[in-house]
Image (cartoon, helix red, strand yellow):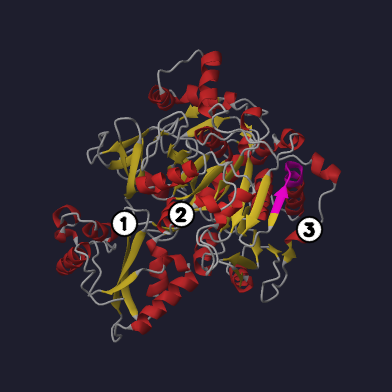
């Protein structure tokens, strides 16, 4: 394989800008002018994206954009299919010898799929699902890690117009069921064991429990690993489905679907209760990915400009970055999947598995959560001794703000390897839009600790409390005009009330994203954290409601509140305040029980760094836990700007939390009892 270095290839945004000049007579003085055009003339911009990427439809769109948020409709009359867009690259990529998928795990096991093999596997599963009566609008749920079978299953569903949804096997069974049962899936695709941290773990009991909790499931496919402890009754062997013959595979074509036909269901973190089941459409995802991949500078791996491109973004399947990585296929880019722990097995060389994987497979584009780079830096990792990383031309980061120190660490590491101009593409968007609002641009200067620019087509601003756009100061991240991959709807939200209250409850017709944003004078951006209470630990997102549900079902726990305190260096401390139940004392036994509850129900990643015995939990008059005010107290905000005692159900408790916060910031730790 021959890779073209970054210095030899033309940036994708420059190619698009040149096309706009030739075909549309448009010219821009700089990126800022181009972005301004893209967010103000939405119809012209998104039509140009459709034409530039040669998207196809058997019926032309009647209108590009109709209505206003939240009741926007895109490309009415057009028909598309995510899988069809992927497989348009198959023949050219196979002719050039470029694979569709390269997959590996901690144990060094690898699998490479050609585009033809991927298409054949997708056709096999799609035809079997169709024989079982699965078609448009039916939900197929998956309990799978980051393996090729997950990609195959998603594309098979998309090709039929079935709706895909997935949870990672490192989530506890109750958390999985809290998501899947809402959507009433007809099919469940699962795995009976996972390899993580250097060891196999059984998942057969979890699969059986998930199936039992989903009475809507009529067919269960299981990927056998040889490490499932118990056989799963009535399971269909995923790999035992008779393969489609060459003629059937060649004749199989993904169905043409309305532009806004549902593609998949993603889930919010469950911060304020039951996780929201967020539905995105085929057309919106395709269109925003076309632009997103230009920002990522991803091109077809078979094209001369990007020949040999190999795109890797480490992610669990329950994180939207899994969807973003799979979206590389839409551009004809080889995707590289890693299944396992980024830290590695206990007793081994820490934080090397991903780099080793990248070196072995000549990855050109390497992405991970910001916490991963922070962990590598803190561990004193030296990339020089990990094999050939010279093919990597770009590093991506998301999930939490990447600090300048961590970005500079990576830049120095690659300079020592001989890559003096490594490009950092820091992005921010999320599950809500299955895309980015803030992204990178290879043509722009490096901005350590910041995001280079606002995404083309995304009318993103930072607003103050009065709804005025501000620069150089932190405000609410808002999007003032429609974006194609905004949710179609929330599953089960028949009247749209929950959807509206989630994004449009502060300003009518303006999307409030839930992040703190500062737009700098040069157009670069800084994300200052979440303005809600989502917990993100090493790329796995979980809402506080899930954590509360895990511990508060214990009789010894009367109430609890959790906050995640970022340390400014890519890490964080998770603190849990706990009110013991009446008649129960505080001690090691209670803490051990809470640890077990969180580990077994959710994931070990969400075990708090410290448990603190509290006399009570502050709540609003409507009974909501005041997570954000408590967090802000610990971040140093003055009480008067954080919490109004007159709006608090139990105002007498506020001085106790103020004292805890002062003690924490003073370095002595909270003054209350706890570990």
Which circle's residue, 1 or 2, is located before the other in the chain? Answer: 2
Q: In the rendering, at what x and y percent does residue 444 appear? A: 42, 29
126 over 239 or under it: above or below: above
CB within 8 Å, label 2 to label 3: no
Q: Is residue 291 magenta?
A: no
Task: Work out which quarter of the rendered image holds the N terminus and state it.
Answer: top right
Name the residue tied to disc 2: 372
Which circle's residue, 2 or 3, is located before the other in the chain? Answer: 3
Residue 166 figure quarter: bottom right
Q: In the rendering, at what x and y percent does residue 574 appear? A: 35, 64
Q: In the rendering, at what x and y percent does residue 247 appear? A: 85, 42
Name the residue tied to disc 1: 567
Task: Please name which of the two marks, 1 or 3, marks the residue nearer to the observer.
Answer: 1
352 over 606 or under it: above or below: above
Q: In the rendering, at what x and y percent does residue 648 appear? A: 19, 62
Name the residue tied to disc 3: 241
Residue at point 34%, 31% (across, down): 523
Residue at point 44%, 25% (across, down): 38
Q: Which residues are magenta?
A: 111-119
Q: Evaluate whether residue 401 shows in this view.
A: no
- CA neighbours of label 2 inside 10 A, class few (<14), some (14 to 19), many (20+): many
In this rendering, position of residue 411 left or right of residue 210:
left
Q: Residue furthest bottom?
A: 583
Q: Evaluate whether residue 459 shows in this view.
A: yes
CB within 8 Å, label 1 to label 3: no
Give the CA distance from mark 2 to mark 3. Answer: 38 Å
Task: Work out which quarter of the rendered image holds the C terminus and state it.
Answer: bottom left
Element type where label 3 sits in the image: loop
Residue 327 figure quarter: top right
Give the CA distance from mark 1 to mark 3. Answer: 50 Å
Which circle's residue, 1 or 3, is located before the other in the chain? Answer: 3
């Amino acid at each position: 394989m021959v890779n073209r270095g970054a210095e030899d290839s033309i940036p994708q945004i420059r190619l698009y800008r040149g096309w706009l000049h030739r075909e549309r007579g448009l010219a821009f003085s700089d990126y800022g002018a181009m972005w301004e055009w893209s967010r103000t003339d939405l119809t012209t911009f998104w039509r140009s994206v459709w034409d530039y990427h040669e998207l196809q439809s058997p019926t032309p769109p009647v209108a590009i954009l109709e209505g206003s948020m939240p009741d926007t409709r895109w490309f009415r009359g057009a028909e598309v299919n995510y899988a069809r867009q992927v497989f348009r690259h198959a023949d050219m990529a196979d002719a050039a010898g470029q694979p569709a998928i390269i997959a590996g795990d901690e144990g060094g096991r690898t699998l490479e799929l050609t585009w033809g093999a991927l298409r054949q596997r997708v056709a096999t599963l799609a035809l079997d699902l169709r024989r079982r009566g699965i078609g448009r609008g039916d939900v197929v749920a998956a309990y799978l890690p980051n393996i090729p079978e997950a990609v195959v299953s998603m594309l098979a569903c998309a090709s039929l117009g079935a709706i895909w949804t997935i949870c990672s096997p490192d989530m506890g069974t109750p958390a999985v069921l809290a998501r899947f049962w809402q959507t009433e899936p007809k099919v469940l695709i699962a795995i009976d064991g996972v390899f993580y941290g250097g060891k196999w773990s059984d998942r057969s009991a979890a699969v059986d429990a998930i199936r039992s909790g989903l009475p809507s499931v009529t067919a269960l496919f299981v990927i056998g690993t040889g490490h499932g402890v118990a056989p799963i009754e009535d399971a269909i062997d995923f790999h035992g489905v008779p393969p489609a013959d060459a003629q059937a595979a060649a004749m199989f074509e993904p169905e043409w679907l309305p532009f806004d036909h549902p593609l998949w269901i993603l889930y919010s973190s469950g911060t304020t209760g039951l996780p929201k089941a967020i539905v995105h459409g085929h057309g919106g995802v395709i269109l925003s990915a076309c632009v997103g991949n230009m920002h990522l500078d991803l091109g077809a791996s078979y094209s001369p400009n990007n020949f040999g491109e190999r795109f890797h973004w480490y992610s669990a399947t329950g994180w939207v970055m899994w969807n973003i990585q799979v979206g590389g296929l839409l551009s004809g880019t080889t995707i590289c999947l890693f299944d396992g722990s980024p830290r590695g097995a206990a007793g081994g060389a820490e934080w090397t598995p991903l780099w080793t994987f990248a070196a072995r497979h000549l990855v050109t584009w390497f992405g991970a959560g910001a916490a991963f780079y922070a962990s590598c830096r803190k561990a004193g990792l030296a990339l020089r001794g990990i094999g050939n990383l010279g093919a990597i031309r770009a590093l991506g980061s998301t999930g939490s703000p990447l600090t300048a120190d961590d970005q500079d660490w990576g830049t120095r590491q690659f300079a020592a390897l001989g890559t003096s101009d490594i490009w950092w593409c820091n992005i921010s968007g999320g599950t809500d839009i299955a895309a980015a609002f803030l992204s990178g641009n290879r043509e722009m200067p490096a901005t350590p600790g910041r995001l280079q620019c606002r995404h083309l087509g995304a009318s993103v601003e930072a607003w103050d409390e009065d709804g005025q756009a501000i620069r150089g100061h932190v405000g609410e991240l808002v999007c003032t005009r429609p974006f194609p991959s905004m949710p179609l709807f929330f599953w089960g939200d028949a009247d749209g009330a929950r959807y509206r209250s989630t994004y449009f409850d502060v300003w009518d017709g303006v999307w409030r994203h839930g992040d703190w944003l500062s737009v700098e004078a040069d157009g670069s951006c800084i994300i200052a954290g979440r303005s809600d209470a989502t917990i993100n630990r090493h790329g796995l997102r979980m809402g506080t409601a899930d954590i509360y549900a895990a511990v508060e079902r214990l009789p010894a726990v009367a109430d609890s509140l959790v906050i995640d305190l970022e340390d400014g260096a890519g890490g964080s401390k998770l603190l849990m305040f706990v009110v013991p139940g009446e008649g129960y004392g505080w001690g090691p036994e209670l803490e051990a029980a809470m640890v077990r509850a969180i580990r077994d129900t959710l994931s070990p990643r969400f075990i708090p760094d410290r448990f603190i015995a509290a006399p009570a939990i502050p709540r609003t008059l409507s009974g909501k836990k005041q997570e954000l005010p408590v967090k802000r107290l610990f971040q140093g905000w003055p009480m008067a700007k954080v919490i109004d005692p007159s709006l608090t159900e139990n105002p007498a408790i506020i001085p106790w939390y103020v004292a805890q916060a002062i003690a924490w910031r003073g370095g002595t730790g909270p003054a209350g009892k706890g570990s």
